[in-house]
Image (tube, rainbow, N blue to C red):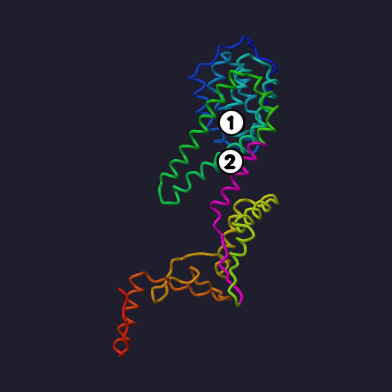
């Protein structure tokens, strides 16, 4: 039988302020927000699990607790790292025994904008910046890069979780007005910063270059592209993937496309690469590898310049041969 949620609680006496131990426990439980994710109510089960310690202390009346648990199972979809902001506001309303319909409306209005704000703040700003700072360490084969990334990322997200819980709980319903009034500006600012960071990562880590050298004059295609705009190929790849994602492509499809383009491009000798393979004489292969389809001639590398000792030995050998043939040659001192 369906349960009808009452509009008001039976006990309308304001509950005592929650202690820090309960608030801290709720912050840790908020990590399980998406542990029971479903497409009917999204994060509702994880939300109630995180709210339960506070609700149990606020509602000593069993019927009020049942009603509170029922309406806290409503549809909810917000950013998992910023959910404690909504928790603090709802806890403040529950503590003051506000109408259930008011609590439900405030919960939805507070949770909605946090999705875009959280994505801009964490996925488009924090993750690229942190990954960019630690990737150089990891590329050198040092596991400290991965460890630092996890430490920095989690330190920031837990600081945000705890900070928002205490701040919004103390601020109450005023936090909703503050959030909605500046949500658009905040999201735009964080998005602009994220775009700059992504552009910097493309310039720093985009290493895709063209191997092709064509024509009788041995024209280096990559040199021409660098003259137009350095890192042009990585930029075009990024823009192409962005356009595909906007058209509905999934990240998995984009990864497979990049994989196929890389394999086919190397098979035809389009992309630069270095397999560090050597020929039968122990010399490195020109161009880094031998493509399956060789449709252009890659020039042989220029001979390495001789060292001072090698040049002296060669000169001495020539002088000795001339002297043996009867030509007088005086070596400089």
Q: Main secondary structure of the magenta part?
A: helix
The magenta-colored residue range is 188-215
Between 257 and 62, the residue placed more toward the observer is 257
In the image, residue 331 sits, relative to residue 20, either above or below, namely below
Q: Quadrant of the N terminus?
A: top right
The residue that mark 1 highlights is 82
Between 128 and 38, the residue placed more toward the observer is 128
In the image, residue 1 sits, relative to residue 143, either above or below, namely above
- At label 1, counting other C-alpha atoms closer than 10 Å, the crowd grade (few under 14, some 14-19, many 20 or more) is many
Residue 292 picture location, percent across and down: 53, 73
Q: Quadrant of residue 105?
A: top right
The residue that mark 2 highlights is 123
Q: Which mark is residue 72?
A: none
Q: How many marks?
A: 2
Q: Is residue 213 magenta?
A: yes
Q: Quadrant of the C terminus?
A: bottom left
- At label 2, counting other C-alpha atoms closer than 10 Å, the crowd grade (few under 14, some 14-19, many 20 or more) is some
Of label 1 and label 2, which has the lower sequence position?
1
């Amino acid at each position: 039988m369906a349960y009808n949620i009452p509009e008001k609680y039976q006990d309308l006496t304001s509950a005592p302020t929650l202690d820090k131990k309960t608030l801290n426990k709720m912050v840790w439980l908020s990590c399980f927000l998406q542990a029971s994710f479903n497409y009917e109510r999204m994060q509702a089960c994880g939300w109630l699990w995180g709210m339960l310690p506070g609700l149990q202390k606020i509602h000593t009346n069993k019927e009020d607790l049942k009603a509170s648990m029922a309406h806290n199972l409503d549809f909810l979809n917000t950013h998992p790292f910023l959910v404690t902001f909504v928790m603090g506001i709802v806890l403040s309303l529950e503590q003051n025994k506000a109408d259930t319909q008011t609590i439900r409306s405030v919960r939805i209005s507070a949770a909605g904008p946090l999705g875009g704000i959280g994505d801009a703040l964490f996925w488009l700003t924090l993750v690229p910046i942190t990954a960019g700072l630690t990737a150089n360490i990891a590329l050198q084969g040092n596991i400290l890069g991965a460890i630092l990334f996890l430490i920095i990322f989690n330190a920031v997200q837990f600081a945000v979780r705890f900070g928002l819980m205490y701040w919004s709980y103390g601020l109450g319903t005023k936090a909703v007005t503050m959030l909605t009034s500046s949500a658009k500006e905040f999201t735009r600012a964080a998005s602009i910063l994220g775009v700059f960071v992504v552009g910097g990562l493309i310039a720093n880590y985009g290493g895709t270059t063209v191997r092709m050298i064509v024509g009788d004059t041995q024209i280096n295609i990559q040199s021409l592209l660098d003259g137009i705009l350095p890192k042009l190929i990585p930029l075009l790849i990024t823009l192409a993937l962005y356009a595909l994602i906007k058209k509905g492509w999934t990240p998995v499809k984009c990864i497979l496309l990049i994989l196929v383009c890389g394999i086919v491009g190397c098979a035809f000798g389009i992309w630069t690469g270095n397999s560090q393979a050597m020929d039968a004489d122990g010399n490195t292969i020109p161009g880094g590898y031998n493509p399956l389809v060789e449709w252009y001639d890659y020039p042989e590398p220029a001979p390495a310049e001789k060292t001072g000792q090698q040049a002296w030995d060669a000169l001495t050998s020539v002088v000795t041969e001339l002297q043996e043939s009867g030509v007088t040659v005086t070596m400089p001192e």
